[in-house]
Amino acid sequence: MSEDLNFYSYERVSDRLILVTEGYSMVHRFTIGVIMGDEKILVIDAGLGAGSGLRPYIESIIGTDKPMICAATHNHPDHMGSAKTFDEAYVSWLDYPSRNDFALNIEQRLEDLKDFALRNEEVQNYCTSHILDNHDVKCLDIKDGDQFDLGGVKIRAIWIPGHSNGSMAFYNEEEKYVFSGDSVNTDVHLKKLDRDGLIKYQTYMKRFISLVSPDAAVYPAHLPLTMDMKIAANLVDAAEDLIQGRSLEQDPPGETIFKDRNNNPDIRMHFRNNTCIVYNREKIKGSRQEAEKDE
């Protein structure tokens, strides 16, 4: 086995923006934003932290002369991994500490790593001995509309509840880009939502569209690709189909990458164009029947 494994690479988008990729296989990779202000550095999302080297890697690219803070789009294991290594860590208190037992749990993170790494033994063995213990990270709150002033760069938080209660996107209005976490992507997992939850998600997605420039670049958390705002419009339309009960019997199974969790035949995926929502069919059907009784 290699003495040291490097799970990071990067792309410089502009003088002030770098995209770092944390990848444990060719298939499963996480996008981490590094935004460089005149006074501070903002890191958006902190990966799984299974190699414990995210901050040193970023510092090897941009140096160590400015404070470096981290804002997570939500409190899940693959977004909070290295957050404690930064000078300040932020995440919505709608997720923190309520999700800490899940998000800040070494056993859970290593369990997730199995599938992120396609069950590669070399990667699993290395990460088991190098994973960062992050159970004691202290996080400051992020609320909808909060702004990070980095000096010459301002980043605004936009709340999109659905994938988690406290999911946030981070928007640079001047430079027209947004980091969308797991809330805006070509596949969005909303398996815990009933019909009312989908209505709420759709409402906030429409609001997100109204707040973000239509020609903004969208950086989701799990694909090393730049997307556009058409993805958000597709998600609104897909949510509308599910809210209205369309295609619930025809949608195919929505298996996740996590093999040990694929035991629910009601987890389905609904597509609009190249975009899908993964949902729980029974939750949608049940809450729709209740809504029809009230009409």
Image (cartoon, grey):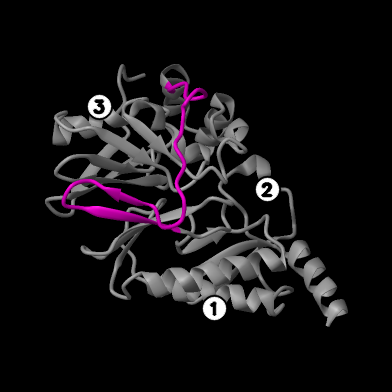
Image quadrant occupied by the N terminus? top left
Which amino acid lies under the numbered mark 1 shown in the image of this protein?
Asp
SS majority, magenta: loop
Question: Magenta residues?
Answer: 131-158
User: Which disc is residue 237 wearing?
Assistant: 1
Please tell me which residue lies in front, 54 or 65: 65
Which amino acid lies under the numbered mark 3 shown in the image of this protein?
Pro
Quarter where residue 100 is shown: top right
Please tell me which residue lies in front, 217 or 269: 217
Dots 3, 2 in contact, CB < 8 A: no
**Residue at horizontal 59 percent and vertical 73 percent from the top:** 239
Q: Is residue 295 in sight in this rendering?
A: yes
Could you tell me residue 253's position as x and y percent? 66, 61
Image quadrant occupied by the C terminus? bottom right
**Vertically, is 43 above or below 132?**
below
**Vertically, is 281 above or below 105?**
below
